[in-house]
Structures are given as structure tokens and as C-alpha cells.
Amino acid sequence: MTDHTIPSRKLTHDGVRALIDAAVAKADEMGVPMGIAVANDGARVVGYLLMDGARVLAQDSASAKAMTAASHRMPTHAIDYNIGMGLSVSTQGKVLPLRGGVPIIIDGYCVGGIGCGSGTGEQDLVVAKAALAAIGAEIPDDNVSEG
């Protein structure tokens, strides 16, 4: 390593598929169809699935939650709501401070974010956490306060 680089980890396409598959399995188990989005460490959506029966606009909210979790490296609901809504307006909806988005942290590196939408905020969060568990990523502390 030189003074001009830093170590990093990248989410693979197999990792993206594993996250989405695990989220779909959990949402099916709960009987709550969802939109599920995965963003990479650059906060770009690299995987997306809209389950049959999910609300159509879940594609937008799930994507925004994934991008927000990846770019802020924290659960979306931990972002101050007023600041987050201001950022949402200024980024044309790419930042969303609502439950259901969590960063994907592996070996201390944030490799992206996953966002789930179409259920209640709590259901969205449960599904996102199940996806993290499936690939061995860190699970955010439930004691993170609402922003």
C-alpha cells in the first residue's frame, strides 16, 4: 500500500444476489411483498427486485434507502429526519431518512447498502437485517435512535 491508496472491499454480483434472495425469502415468510434494492459502496444501485404484489413506488423508496445507507454508512432511520428530508429535496429523492435502509458492513468496510420498501418501516427493517445476516454482514444495533 502506498500513501495514495486505501484498502477496501467490494460487493460482488454473487453477494448482491445473495442479499436479494435472502430478503425475498424473509419477506415471503412474513407475507409482505417488497421492493428490494442493493447499492454499492459508491451509492449506486447495482441490484433490484420488485416482488409480485409490492407497491409500485417501493422501487423508488427501496433504491433511495439503499443509496442513503451506503452513502451515509448508517441505518436510514438514524439520520435526522428534518435534515434528511431537506437532503431528499436537494438530491431529487436520492436520500430518504425512513426505516428500511441499512449499510452493508463486512470486516469493518462499508461495501454498500440495502433498502427495502412496501411494508411498514419496521417490516422493511426486519427484511433488510435478514439479508445482512445471510451474508455475514454486521447487523446494526437496534438501539440506534430515530433521527
Image (tube, grey):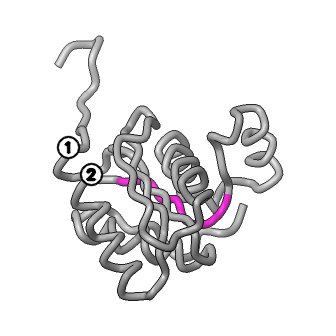
Magenta-colored stretch includes residue 103: yes
Q: Quadrant of residue 131?
A: bottom left
**Residue beneath disc 2:** 16
Residue 18: x %, y % from top left: 22, 61
Q: Nearer the viewer, residue 34 or 122?
A: 34
Give, as a single range, the part of the protein colored magenta: 98-104
Figure label count: 2
Mark 1, other Cα within 10 Å: few <14 / some 14–19 / many ≥20: few
Q: What's under tag 1, amino acid-wise?
A: Thr
Residue 106: x %, y % from top left: 27, 53
Tell me if 29 is positioned left or right of 55 in this view: left
Q: What's under tag 2, amino acid-wise?
A: Val
Tag 1–tag 2 contact (CB < 8 Å)? yes
Mark 2, other Cα within 10 Å: few <14 / some 14–19 / many ≥20: many
Q: Quadrant of the N terminus?
A: top left
Q: Nearer the viewer, residue 49 or 86?
A: 49
**Residue beneath disc 1:** 12
Q: Quadrant of residue 12?
A: top left
Q: Quadrant of the C terminus?
A: bottom right
Magenta-colored stretch includes residue 16: no
SS category of the residue bearing label 1: loop
The residue drawn where x is 66% and y is 51% is: 96
Tell me if 2 is positioned left or right of 145 in this view: left
Q: Nearer the viewer, residue 57 or 10?
A: 57
Distance of label 1 from label 2 (alpha carbons): 6 Å
Q: Quadrant of residue 93?
A: top right
The dot on residue 92 is none
The residue drawn where x is 49% and y is 81% is: 32
